[in-house]
Every structure is written in C-alpha cells, then in structure tokens.
C-alpha cells in the first residue's frame, strides 16, 4: 500500500468528516473532483480505507463513563480473549500494546456501576490474567 502525501491529506479530511462531499474535499485540497474521487476509490480498493464509521458527539452520551481498561492475557489465549471482547458492545476499541499489559480496551457505559460490571465481566474471561482501569475525565481532542 503506497500512500502519498496527497493521500494523507485526503485521509485527514475524511477523518474530520467522512460524509464530506467529493466537491467539498476537492475544494479544501485544491484538487479536481475527479482526482479526489479516483483517489478515494483507489484507497478503498487497496484496503487503506477499510470503511466509514460514526463518531457520536459527547453530548449524545452525556454522563456516560468512559475508561481505558488495561488487560493482561495468559499465554496462548490472545485470540479467544479478543473474540470475547469483540462480542461486548460496551468495548468500543481494542488495542494490542507493549509494556506490562497486552491489551487496552476502551469501555463506554452509562454509569459507574455498569463500568464496575464491565470490568468484572472482562476479568472473568478465560485467559485474562488481570485488569486495571483508568476513567477518562475528558477528551482534549480526537481525530
């Protein structure tokens, strides 16, 4: 997958608003509409753009508790743990990381009690060694 500087700019605009029209993106990048469209199609075909998603405004989930949940996984259990976490809709993202933990999950739930229950459910997954959570107080920015 070869990504040019122009592709990076296009991806940056799409990260801000994946629903922006091709014409709007073309104006922002000072490219022709057909150039933008062909670049998007090429990036989709190459698998660089794997899909489009919805980012929900914080006010839509006002009062929800968000936390990073750090997880250690027992040897040879990673695939099963990842599958179990993927099945939990409260887990919005999952990252493999270096350091003392193996995974970091982003959990989003309506209340502190629900976060307590979610971390208990995660800790009960076969193959999970331990968990540590950090409640997110605010997001300074997201892309």
Image: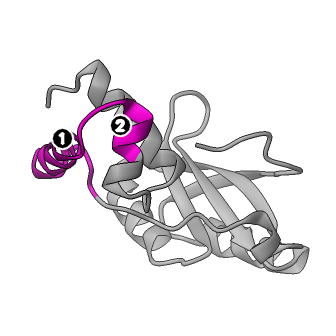
Q: Is residue 73 visible?
A: no
Q: Is residue 125 visible?
A: yes
At 62% from the left edge and 68% from the top edge, which residue is drawn?
122
At 77% from the left edge and 74% from the top edge, which residue is drawn?
61
Evaluate if marks 2 and 1 touch, with contact meaning CB atoms under 8 Å apart: yes
Q: Magenta stretch?
A: 25-50
38 left or right of 8 in image: left
Is 76 above or below relative to 141? Answer: below
Residue 5 location in percent, x, y?
A: 30, 19
127 left or right of 56 in image: left
Is 14 above or below relative to 112? Answer: above
Please tell me which of labels 2 and 1 falls first in the chain: 2
Q: Quadrant for residue 3, please give it.
A: top left
Q: Which residue is mark 2?
A: 10
For this rendering, which residue is in front, 139 or 107? 139
Q: Assign the C terminus to one quadrant of the image.
A: top right
Dot 1 lies on which element? Answer: helix
Q: Residues within 10 Å of mark 1 (few under 14, many from 20)?
A: some
Q: Quadrant for residue 19, please give it.
A: bottom left
At 77% from the left edge and 64% from the top edge, which residue is drawn?
58
C-alpha separation, residue under disc 2 versus residue under disc 1: 8 Å
Q: Assign the N terminus to one quadrant of the image.
A: top left
Dot 2 lies on which element? Answer: helix
For this rendering, which residue is in front, 134 or 138? 138
Badge number at residue 89: none
118 left or right of 28 in image: right
Badge number at residue 39: 1
């Amino acid at each position: 997958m070869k990504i040019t500087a122009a592709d990076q700019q296009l991806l940056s605009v799409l990260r801000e608003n994946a629903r922006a029209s091709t014409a709007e993106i073309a104006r922002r990048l000072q490219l022709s509409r057909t150039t933008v469209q062909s670049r998007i199609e090429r990036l989709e075909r190459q698998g660089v753009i794997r899909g489009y998603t919805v980012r929900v405004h914080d006010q839509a989930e006002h009062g929800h508790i968000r936390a990073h949940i750090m997880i250690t996984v027992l040897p040879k259990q990673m695939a099963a743990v990842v599958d179990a976490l993927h099945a939990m809709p409260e887990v919005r993202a999952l990252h493999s990381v270096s350091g003392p933990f193996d995974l970091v999950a982003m959990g989003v739930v309506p209340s502190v009690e629900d976060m307590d229950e979610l971390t208990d459910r995660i800790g009960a997954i076969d193959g999970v060694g331990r968990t540590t959570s950090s409640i997110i107080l605010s997001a300074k920015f997201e892309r």
